[in-house]
Image (tube, helix red, strand yellow):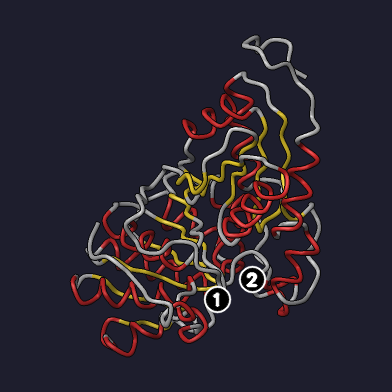
Amino acid sequence: MAGGMTYTAVDSTSLSTAEIYGKALVELGRAHPEVVALTADLAKSTKIGDFQKEFPDRFFNVGIAEQNLFGVAAGMAKAGLVPFLSTFSQFASLRAADQLSTDLCYQNINAKVIATHSGTSFGQAGSTHHAITDLAVTRSMPNLTVICPADGVETYNAVMAAYETPGPFYIRINRGFDRVLYKDSDYGFEIGKAVTVTEGTDLTIIACGSCVFQAVQAADFLEKADGLKIRVLDMHTIKPIDKEAIIKAVMDTRRIITVEDHNVLGGLGSAVAEVVVESGKGCAFKKLGVPDKFAPIGLHEDIMADLGIDANGIIAAVREVMKADFELDDDWDDEV
């Protein structure tokens, strides 16, 4: 993977997923003159403005016209450029869904969508800016790689991997103010391979995005308070999903909880459930996320608490699932 990233405690306050995206794109621009950046009048909000400042001749603002944004990017990619286009997740996945599907995915275009303000991270903006269905939309589009980084460092890895991997990408990041999970970029990031953040044999939490940090906090508390060994998987790649890691978790722990800042329908939880069902194996299973309703309006941390996808909500869910009964044998045909 090109480059590398480390930080100190002084730097940590500027390591949000959006901030790091802007810095990573500038780094790519310096090394690769074919990289261009596009936005739909959201350069400052999406941090793609960092690229604009350094490479004004390679930056393009199409105005408040997200559908045109995707069409222009597709044309640039056809001409041999590598466009990174950035807008809010809600607009990238819904307003421009037709262009994402037809202009980028159908033609297998080498363009990279950095979708910001995902989930409920821009909670105070209201339901029009809550991207709680984008994973359901994007993971169903052929040829599209879908990544949901856990923090700024992982965002850096995702952006670099997207450049190095041909084809369309949808990278889903938050508005900002993210918690730092990884100390540096050399922790083994690989597209399609989950990262085992903590080891455990009692239950597995499979999380993505901002929920990974919360899952780690919950696992640490549960080990100290309840003596439980909780495995936490950072499932940063939603598509292609790491089937091997999911099946191993089922076999090793027999209890799975998924956590995401997204509707419980169609996102990470559904993707994991599909793998479990297709495997023919049984386990206790619970999905945490937005329970098929529009999320409340407020600060991100308050919304996460209300939805039960913060550390406290995950702790409660683990204790509930730990009560689920099944036979501890190797007969998979009579599970409850």
Give the Cα distance between marks 1 and 2.
8 Å
Q: Residues within 10 Å of mark 1 (few under 14, many from 20)?
A: many
> How many dots with numbers?
2
The residue sitting at 54% across, 58% down in the picture is 98
Task: State the quadrant of the N terminus.
Answer: bottom left
- Under tag 2, what secondary structure? loop
**Left or right: 324 in relation to 73:** right
Q: Earlier in the sequence, mark 1 or mark 2?
A: 2
> Badges 1 and 2: C-beta atoms under 8 Å apart?
yes
**Left or right: 290 in relation to 168:** right
The residue sitting at 76% across, 55% down in the picture is 313
The residue sitting at 45% across, 68% down in the picture is 152
Query: Which amino acid is tagged 1?
Result: Gly
The image quarter in which residue 192 lies: top left
Determine which residue is flagged by label 1. Answer: 176
Q: Position of residue 190 (x, y in %)?
A: 36, 48
Q: Position of residue 274 (x, y in %)?
A: 61, 32
Query: Which amino acid is tagged 2?
Result: Ser
**Left or right: 241 in relation to 316:** left
- Under tag 1, what secondary structure? loop
166 or 330: nearer the viewer: 330
51 or 174: nearer the viewer: 174
The image quarter in which residue 143 lies: top left
Determine which residue is flagged by label 2. Answer: 121
Answer above or below: position of 111 versus 121.
Answer: above
Q: Position of residue 281 (x, y in %)?
A: 62, 20
Q: Residues within 10 Å of mark 2 (few under 14, many from 20)?
A: many
